Image: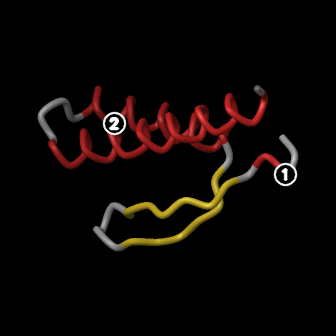
Amino acid sequence: MSDSEETTTTGTTTTGTTTAETTTTESLQHALVGQLMAIIGAPDDEDVARAADDIVQALDVRLREAQTAAA
């Protein structure tokens, strides 16, 4: 993936602090896989579910931006 396909997003870390970080579609996909594995390991943990939801939302935005740019 090229640098031109990167986007900057603001996210929340597991400690609850907000950080600005550069993410790519691929890194979001890898993060989502990790969070899904965490959900399997802790299905009743609401914090894990919220973190996964945050990643899904960020990935959705990123994919929509890529789709719009390609159109």
Quarter of the rendering occupied by the C terminus: top right
Quarter of the rendering occupied by the N terminus: top right
Q: Which mark is residue 54?
A: none
Judged from this view, the residue extending furthest toward the front is: 71
Image x and y of residue 45, in percent: 15, 41
Mark 2 is surrounded, within 10 Å at the Cα level, by few (under 14), some (14 to 19) or many (20 or more) other residues, namely: some
Instruction: Name the residue rendered at 36%, 46% in the picture.
Output: 54
Which amino acid type is marked by label 2? Ala
Q: Secondary structure at mark 2?
A: helix
Instruction: Name the residue rendered at 15%, 43% in the picture.
Output: 46
Horizontal placement of 12 versus 29: left or right?
left
Image x and y of residue 42, in percent: 21, 35
Which of the 4 quarters of the picture holds residue 49?
A: top left
Question: What residue is pinned by disc 2?
Answer: 38
Question: What residue is pinned by disc 1?
Answer: 4
Q: Nearer the viewer, mark 1 or mark 2?
A: 1
Which amino acid type is marked by label 1? Ser
